Amino acid sequence: MCAKILDGRKISKEIRNDIIEQVQHLKDRYEVAPGLAVVIVGDDDASHVYVSMKEKACQKVGFHSEVYKLPKETTQEELLKLIDELNASKKIHGILVQLPLPKGIDENLINSHILPTKDVDGFHAINTGKLLLGEESFIPCTPKGILELIKRTGENLTGKHAVVIGRSNIVGKPAGVLLLKENTTVTICHSKTENLEKHVQMADIVVAAVGIPELIKGNMIKEGAIVIDAGTRKVNGKLVGDVAYEEASKKASWITPVPGGVGPMTITMLLENTLKAAKAQCE
Ligand code: NAP
């Protein structure tokens, strides 16, 4: 088998074109542009690259965008004060604090200080709880993008066995919850899982979210599986995923490339969440 490619850039473009139309509608009806504030603390290079990608994506779809670049010496109190201001701002519908934060700042406290209605990253405990309860909520962008990619295969997901590798709060765990909601049978693997290979070999759907280059080999992939690779790690200046792409492509029915798979979808889902927040705050 030679896998079909789940092209995150192409799918993102389609979704972003739809967002542009909806933004125009919002501007015509309410004279409001969806507003996203992104806050970054410190000088981590990769984080600054992600923030500038988010800023550009906002501008391209006609959002109002504010970026706050704070020095690494910023205190938790100062950050909480800025969030208070953004929570109160009429121009801002979504707030994102870029992670990781410097030592000494409690990420959970910061995430939970953002109003749940402006929590477009979906990390607030209220949104996390609602996701678990199956209630309407903001879904974290990467798992939301992963589910969208899986749905784009057009395959019936009910009864399929999904194996998620990684159990972080921002990718693995919510991806597992979303797949459970789609009536798949979910296995979540992590660093203490015994015989990872055996679990992955049983998967109709593989979601890799670890950060270890090419951890998942071709011989671990079941014939015809859908393979989603969220992993990203720079190796010799090149971005590499968690899945050995060439080998896995020979077994999978669908596969995401790295780069160009999950990455663009994450930013697109952030735009979707911000649009949703703006609509809810206008209507
Ligand atoms: P993370 O918080 O470091 O979590 C990694 C997970 O992998 C943990 O649950 C860990 O298990 C598990 N793990 C580590 N070694 C393992 C092994 N040998 N076998 C099985 N599981 C293992 O990372 P994350 O934030 O979830 O991100 C995961 C990857 O996705 C990273 O490469 C990150 O760069 C990428 N990512 C991409 C996007 C995007 O937009 N494309 C967005 C977010 C993240 P334990 O829990 O036991 O430690």
Image (cartoon, helix red, strand yellow):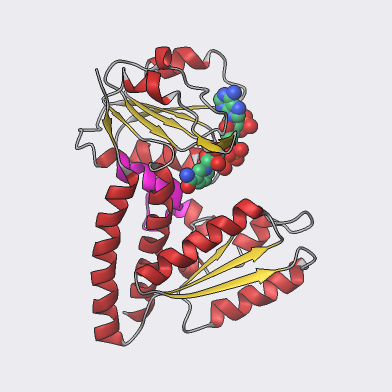
Q: Ligand 1 is located in which of the four quadrants? A: top right
Magenta span dominant secondary structure:
helix
Region in magenta: 129-149
Q: Nearer the viewer, residue 113 or 101?
A: 101
Q: Residue at x 71, y 61 (%)?
A: 42
On the image, the x and y values in percent for residue 14 come to 24, 56
Q: Quadrant of the C terminus?
A: bottom left
Image position of 207 with respect to 248: above or below: below
Q: Residue at x 48, y 60 (%)?
A: 53
- Of all residues, the one furthest to the front in this rendering is 236
Q: Residue at x 67, y 56 (%)?
A: 107
Image position of 83 with respect to 214: above or below: below
Q: Within the magenta stretch, is there residue 48?
A: no
Residue 132 in sight in this render = no
On the image, the x and y values in percent for residue 210 come to 55, 33
Q: Nearer the viewer, residue 181 or 223?
A: 223
Q: Nearer the viewer, residue 154 or 129?
A: 154
Left or right: residue 73 compared with residue 46: right
On the image, the x and y values in percent for residue 58 come to 42, 68
Residue 93 in which image quadrant = bottom left
